Image (cartoon, grey):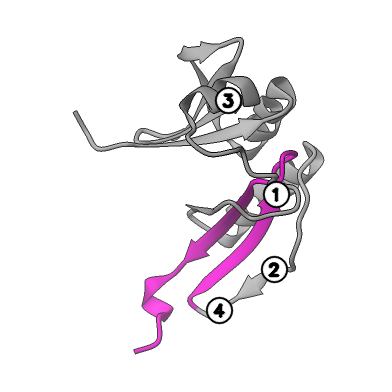
Amino acid sequence: MAKQIFINLAVKHLQKSMDFYTALGFTNNPQFSDDAGKCMVWSENIFVMLLTHEKFASFATKPIADTKSNVAGLFSLSTGSVDEVNSIVESGLKAGGTEPIEFKDYGFMQQRTIEDPNGHTWEIFYMDLSKFPA
C-alpha cells in the first residue's frame, strides 16, 4: 500500500464543511463517509476527514481545540500555478471561508491563506524551485 496522509478535522456543520472543501477542489469518497464523517480527497495520497465533534472526540485523547480563536495546525496544499492558488482561494471564500492575512510573495513561492468555516487554517501555495535563492 502506498503511503498516504489522512488529516482529521473536527467540524461543527458537516455539510457546510463538505461544501467548502468541494469548492476548494476536493472530492468526496463515499466509501469512507457516513452521517458523522466525510472523506474528502485532494489527491491519490492526501485525504481530509471531516468529522463531527462527537465522532472526532471518540478518537481524541484531549479536548477539541477552538480553531476559531486558536491555531491547532497549519495545513499547506501545493498547486501548479499562481492562478490555481487564486482560483482555489476565491472559490473557498465564496463557500464561506475567510482570508485572515494578505497574499505573500517570497519570490520563489506565492501563498494565500484561507480558513474554513470552522477556523482550520490552510495555506495554498505555488512554488517555483528554479527561483529559490542559492
Q: Secondary structure at mark 1?
A: strand
Kind of residue at disc 3: Leu
CA gap between label 3 and label 2 equals 29 Å
- The image shows residue 107 at horizontal and vertical percentages of 53, 80
Q: Which residue is mark 4?
A: 106
In the image, is residue 114 part of the stretch drawn in magenta? yes
Residue 70 circle label: none
Q: Of circles 3 and 1, which is in front?
A: 3
**Of residues 102 and 32, which is closer to you in this image?**
32
Distance between the alpha carbons at the discs numbered 4 and 2? 10 Å
Q: Residue furthest bottom?
A: 134
Is 74 rendered above or below residue 119? below
- Location of mark 1 (residue): 115
Return the x and y of residue 129 as percentages of the image width and height.
38, 72
Q: CA distance from mark 3 to mark 4?
A: 34 Å
Residue at image location 61% in from the left, 76% down from the top: 105
State the image quarter where residue 101 is shown: bottom right
Q: What is the crowding at mark 4: few (fewer than 14 residues within 10 Å), some, or many (at least 20)?
A: few
Which quadrant of the rendered structure holds the N terminus? top left
Sequence order check: which comes first, mark 1 or mark 2? Answer: 2
Q: Which residue is mark 2?
A: 103
Q: Badge 1: few (under 14), some or many (20 or more) residues near its Cα, within 10 Å? A: many
